[in-house]
Amino acid sequence: MKNLIVGLVIVGVIGGIGFLIYQNNSLPGEHDELAQCLSDNGVKMFGAYWCPACKQQIREFSKSFKYVDYVECSLPNRGGQTANCEEQEITSYPTWEFSDGERVLGVLSLGKLAEKAGCKF
């Protein structure tokens, strides 16, 4: 009987954690509208998975980053740059490219990104 109760408690805890994770992932992100507006307005972020500044920029968007038009430039194991990024002459990460062709290097505040792209923030 004791093992049954312990088992039910464990199943309940695991189920509760799973529900909380599902609930959190199904809620909209704080910056979804901005991220979607950037993409809709032709803004791209070129970056690399190993780049600390890129990770910082991604953290600023939090889960809304999934709406940003992101281009991964690094090959696996930091084995060089993708052909696409070489052709685009990307030399620094992150590189933000706007619809008019202007590029800005480095981490940008969400407010600055919104301003340059004509999005509300």
Image (tube, rainbow, N blue to C red):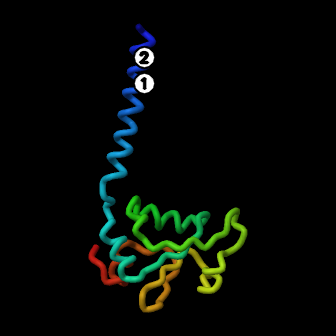
Q: Position of residue 121 (x, y in %)?
A: 28, 73
Name the residue tied to disc 1.
Answer: 10
Graded by Cα atoms within 10 Å as few (under 14), some (14 to 19) or many (20 or more), the crowding at tag 2 reads few
Q: Mark 1 is on which residue type?
A: Ile
Going by the numbered disc 2, the residue's amino acid type is: Val
Whether tag 2 and tag 1 are in contact, CB under 8 A, the answer is yes
Residue at the image position 49 percent from the left and 72 percent from the top: 70
Q: Position of residue 115 (x, y in %)?
A: 33, 81
**Whole-number angstrom distance, CA of label 2 to CA of label 1:** 6 Å
Compare residues 47 and 21 and report the one nearer the observer: 21
Q: Which residue is mark 2?
A: 6
Quarter occupied by residue 36: bottom left
Residue 78 occupies quadrant: bottom right
Q: Callout 2: helix, strand or loop? A: helix
- Outermost left residue: 120
Q: Residue furthest top?
A: 1
Task: Tell me if 116 is positioned left or right of 51 in this view.
Answer: left
Question: Which percent across, then down, holds residue 97?
Answer: 48, 83
Q: Residue at x 47, y 78 (%)?
A: 44
Residue 64's place in the image compared with 5, above or below, is: below
Q: Is residue 90 found left or right of 41 in the rendered image? A: right
**Residue at 45% of width from left, 74% of height from top?**
69
**Which residue: 39% across, 29% down?**
13
Q: Quadrant of the N terminus?
A: top left
Question: Residue 32, relative to residue 116: is it above or below?
Answer: above
Circle number at residue 52: none
- Which residue ends up furthest to the bottom in the rendered image? 100
